[in-house]
């Protein structure tokens, strides 16, 4: 017997993909207008990733921190590392123009929370994590790719490429390449699909994001 009960909007595949890349993000990242970027220095980009990675690894592995303090510390690092507002606008794409101011403000808040909770819900899985730098390369004048090797206990090591650009005079991660896939493009496609499946309503994406946050919070509570 087929149920006529409407299904709640949800984001397909987000849990698996967005937490794959250890600490810096969880999601696809910002593509800013060309004029907003300056030439990136390869050594500076590499040092930026090293510092951010060291800080995140230290926060995740610090036995003195309880869950709330660990999440708060990780959130500060992530917000300093990622242009979250620019990231979110790129991922929302053409629907930015459809969203009203209240929807856009809530979207930005939810997106910020998802980035942090995608990691905090998995602190236990990442306990004991280590990372090391691989090869860095200048991608264009405006961005560089910094390769890292992520190691977790009892888990095969994996490689991630961090795309770094200068945004507002500061280095920022603007994309993460995992297994050859751009996470910003993957997330943009998933968010767009949620909206399209639900009559083009941005509100449906906001509902799906709230549902995802509730699931992540429940997982976090189970430790």
Image (tube, helix red, strand yellow):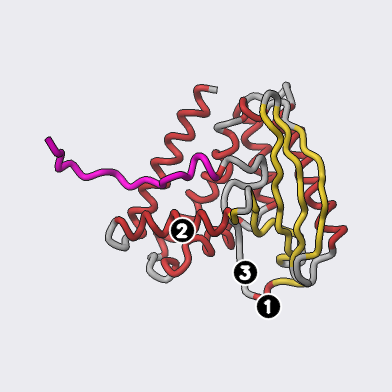
Residue displayed at 73% across by 22% down: 64
Q: Is residue 86 magenta?
A: no
Locate residue 14, reporting x and y percent: 48, 45
In this rendering, which labeled residue sits more in front, label 3 or label 2? 2
Locate residue 198, reporting x and y percent: 29, 56
Q: Which quadrant is home to the C terminus? A: top right
Residue 152, image quadrant: top right
**Dot 2 surroundings within 10 Å: few (below 14), some, or many (20 or more)?**
some
Q: Residue furthest bottom?
A: 35
Kind of element beneath mark 2 = helix
Task: Please say if 152 is above or below 11.
Answer: above
Kind of element beneath mark 1 = helix
Kind of element beneath mark 3 = loop
- Between the C-alphas of marks 2 and 1, the distance is 25 Å
Q: Which residues are magenta?
A: 1-17
The disc at residue 189 is: 2
Left or right: residue 220 versus residue 78 is left
Q: Which residue is mark 1?
A: 35
Q: Which quadrant is home to the N terminus? A: top left
């Amino acid at each position: 017997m087929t149920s006529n009960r409407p299904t709640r909007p949800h984001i397909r595949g987000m849990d698996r993909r967005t937490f794959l890349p250890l600490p810096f993000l969880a999601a696809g990242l910002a593509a800013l207008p060309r004029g907003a970027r300056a030439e990136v220095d390869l050594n500076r980009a590499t040092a930026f990733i090293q510092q951010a990675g060291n800080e995140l690894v230290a926060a995740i592995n610090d036995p003195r921190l309880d869950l709330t303090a660990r999440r708060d510390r990780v959130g500060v690092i992530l917000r300093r590392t990622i242009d979250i507002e620019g990231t979110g606008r790129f991922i929302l794409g053409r629907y930015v123009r459809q969203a009203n101011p209240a929807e856009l403000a809530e979207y930005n808040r939810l997106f910020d929370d998802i980035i942090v909770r995608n990691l905090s819900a998995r602190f236990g899985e990442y306990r004991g994590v280590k990372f090391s730098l691989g090869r860095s390369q200048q991608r264009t004048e405006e961005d560089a790719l910094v390769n890292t090797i992520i190691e977790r206990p009892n888990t095969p090591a994996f490689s991630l490429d961090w795309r770094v650009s200068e945004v507002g005079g500061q280095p920022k991660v603007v994309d993460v390449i995992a297994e050859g896939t751009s996470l910003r493009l993957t997330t943009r496609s998933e968010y767009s699909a949620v909206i399209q499946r639900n009559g083009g309503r941005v509100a449906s994406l906001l509902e799906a994001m709230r549902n995802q946050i509730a699931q992540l919070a429940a997982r976090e509570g189970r430790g």
